[in-house]
Amino acid sequence: MPRGDAWARAQRTTAEMERHLGAIARLADERAVAIQELLDHGFTRSEIARRLGVTPAIITKVLRRPVVADAHPAAVSQA
């Protein structure tokens, strides 16, 4: 059963995916900044991981991801 022009659907869904990926990247930046703030306040990676329901390895991975500097002036230190 045809669902309209395949090119139009492909273009529309690509644009929608890019919009969502941008939002996910911004949220990932905010999470990394928040995690770094928690570390700066003396929490350990293990404590943060436990409270967020992830492993300490995920915390390390989050902190290794580059944060967009102009979006967050308080850059996350490299782990």
Image (cartoon, grey):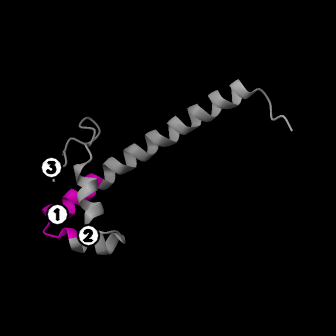
Q: Residue at x 39, y 49 (%)?
A: 27
Q: For the residue marked with disc 1, what is the amino acid?
A: Leu
In the rendered image, residue 62, in percent from the top left (x then y), is placed at 28, 54
Position of 59 with respect to 4 (left or right) is left
Crowd class of label 2 (few under 14; some 14 to 19; many from 20; radius 10 Å): some
Residue ID for mark 2: 48
In the image, which residues are magenta?
A: 32-45
* Image quadrant in which the C terminus is located: bottom left
| Residue at which label 1 appears | 39
Instruction: Tell whether label 2 touches label 1 (CB within 8 Å).
Output: yes
Which residue appears at 81% of the width and 35% of the height?
3
Residue 36: percent from left, percent from top: 20, 57
The quarter of the picture where the N terminus appears is top right
N-terminal of the pair, mark 3 or mark 1, is 1
In the rendered structure, which amino acid carries the disc numbered 2?
Answer: Ile
Q: Residues within 10 Å of mark 3 (few under 14, many from 20)?
A: few
Q: Dots 2 and 3: beta carbons under 8 Å? A: no
Mark 1–mark 2 distance (CA, rounded to whole Å): 8 Å
Q: Is residue 13 left or right of residue 62?
A: right
* Residue 71 position in % (x across, y down): 29, 39
Q: N-terminal of the two: label 1 or label 2?
A: 1
In the displayed structure, would residue 37 be above or below residue 51? Answer: above
Residue that numbered label 3 is attached to: 77
**Distance Cα–Cα, label 3 vs label 1:** 10 Å
Nearer-N-terminus badge (2/3)? 2
- Residue 61 position by quadrant: bottom left
State the separation of the CA atoms marked 2 and 3: 16 Å
Residue at left offset 28%, top offset 70%: 49
Residue 12 falls in image quadrant: top right
Assign the magenta stretch its main secondary structure. Answer: helix
**Looking at the picture, which amino acid does disc 3 mark?**
Ser
